[in-house]
Image (cartoon, rainbow, N blue to C red):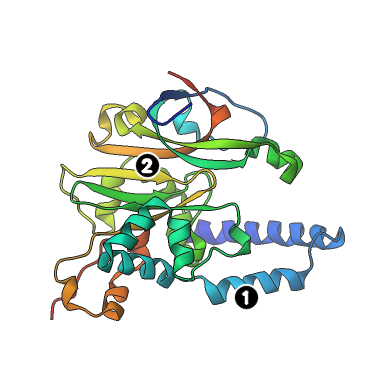
Amino acid sequence: MNVGDRVRVRVMNPPGHNRAPSYVRGRCGVVVRSVGDGRFPDEAAAVGSDARQETIWTVAFAGTELWGPDAGPRDVVHVDLFETYLEGA
Amino acid sequence: MSGSGHHRNGELQARVNALLALAEERGIVTRAQIDERIEALGSSVSPLNGALMVVRSWNDPAYRDRLLYDAGAAATELGIAGGGYSSDIHLHAVANTAEVHNVVVCTLCSCYPLAWLGPPPAWYKSEAYRSRVVRDPRGVLAEFGTVLPDDVEVRVWDASAEARYLVVPRPPEGVEQLSEDEQLDLVTRDCLIGVAVPRVPVH
């Protein structure tokens, strides 16, 4: 995965902790930046600091991709997402 | 709204007390450690930290470049380190321009660049702000008195992981006539979140 890639947030509803906001699940955006590594929160919620490190990507979503034609045409929402949450689109 | 907010605060307080009692009982943390942490936080974190970085960037283009490239390093350069409680946090500065306006939120909880902005305002943690600013940022900004031209792109930053965002507002017209101390007064907490823009007072 790299900056410029078009990605989709996986559709998921895990029973435990998860930090992919529901409003971006299943939506497509473009990777604009690498934030660096962070402890994978789904795992960290269960095992703490032993959780694996994973790359976090900032993904830019057009407002219209998230909210349809009611969104402002020049609104962009950036969300930081762990790589596991993303797939190629 | 204030009535239900009060009720919810009461519930939250009861939950915090129960957790704290358990954590103490199991030897995970002591009340003294918690008080120490709160005190350390209160004495070092303030929106003045963020304002110092912004004003330096207005007056020093090379600093501005460094701030936008690596805000954490640019903060350390001014002696404003994040502190031990935020070692996993990556600070990222996003700059407003004539074409782009930035605004920060955490839709999942209340992630906030505490070390550089001080304690967050209550509205930042409210469900109303968190749910609406991603859907209708222009409408929410207008309610704060920040009305943007239609051709300006609005970039919302939802801090859902380890990054924390600091908005670098544009220097307002007439700012060069002010001293650095006067400039600092213009860069309010709300400007650093992105719901306001600095204005030079008219005399």
Q: Which residue is drawn at 37% across and 28% down?
A: A4
> As drawn, is B138 to the left or to the right of B157?
left
Residue topped by disc 1: B39
Residue topped by disc 2: B134
In this view of the protein, which residue sits in the foreground, B17 or B46? B46
Residue A43, above or below A49 = above
Give, as a three-letter code, the residue at label 2.
Answer: Val
User: Residue A6, labelled with which disc?
Assistant: none
Instruction: Identify the chain of the residue marked 1, using the numbered disc in the image.
Output: B
In this view of the protein, which residue sits in the foreground, B46 or A23? B46
> As drawn, is B133 to the left or to the right of B176?
right
x then y, percent, for residue B5: 52, 58
Q: Is mark 2 on a helix, strand or loop?
A: loop
Q: Which quadrant would the C terminus of chain B be assigned to in this image?
A: bottom left
Q: Nearer the viewer, mark 1 or mark 2?
A: 1
In this view of the protein, which residue sits in the foreground, B72 or B124? B72
Q: Is disc 2 surrounded by few (<14), some (14 to 19) or many (20+) residues within 10 Å?
A: many
